[in-house]
Image (spheres, rainbow, N blue to C red):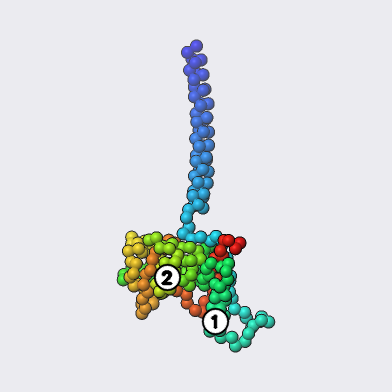
Amino acid sequence: MTKKLLIQIKNEWLSNLWLVLELLVVSVVMWYVVDYLYTRAATYLEPKGFDIEHCYLIELGELTPKSPDYIAGHTSQQTHDDIAKLLERLRHRPEIEAVSLSQNSYPYNGSNSSAEVSYDTLRSPGWTIRRLVTPDFPRVFRYRGTRGETPEQLAEMLERGDFMASDNLFSKYDRRMTDFVGQRFHLFGDTTKTYRLGAGIARCTLSRLRPGTKLSIPMMVKQNFL
């Protein structure tokens, strides 16, 4: 009788062991699935620092001599004047809230350009993304500074010729850019000219627009006109 009971306990223990192993495997798989979905959802819902609601993009390019609409002898200055006229006409439309001119600078674009930012002995990484924009850019996407600056305040800083940098630009030195607001920096590897840091913006580097570049026009349309 005792031997029979011991055999029964042994058989049940082996069965329970397999059950525990099965539950362990299911628990690990379920934990992975829940963690993966939670991480994806949390990342998707995380504030991005900009607002693309009711924003539209107009891309500009130049015609080649092969195009029937090509105008021979059209100077670069005339092209710049045409672009400026287009922007002014868009700004005067009642349904347009803000219009900016930029190069590779709108959110989710697939093209980037890089630049070097230096202060004293501090050097930014070589892959630092550069955003060339006009001052209305923060108004279009409603960027806010890391110190609480409104889009209007950021636009005013760009109008003064200041540049803006992400607060983690010098993170390898364990330095935050908010510590350098108002200081003079060298940009683009040019040590003959300095630029004043205006404010920190999360995940974005902005500077003044340079002429002669391929441009895009992001604009904000007022919601009540849609």
Name the residue located 46 percent from the left edge and 71 percent from the top edge: 135
What's the amino acid at mark 1?
Asp
Q: Is residue 113 visible?
A: no
Q: Nearer the viewer, residue 153 or 64?
A: 153
Q: Residue furthest top?
A: 1
The mark tally for this picture is 2
Separation of residues labelled 2 and 1 (CA atoms)? 23 Å
**Residue 81 pos. (x, y %):** 54, 81
Q: Which residue is mark 2?
A: 156
Name the residue located 48 percent from the left edge and 57 percent from the top edge: 48
> Relative to 206, is 22 above or below?
above
**Mark nearer the N terminus (2 vs 1):** 1
Q: Which residue is mark 1?
A: 81
| Residue 159 falls in image quadrant | bottom left
| Residue 176 falls in image quadrant | bottom left
What's the amino acid at mark 2?
Glu
**Residue 90 pos. (x, y %):** 57, 72
Q: Nearer the viewer, residue 113 or 136?
A: 136
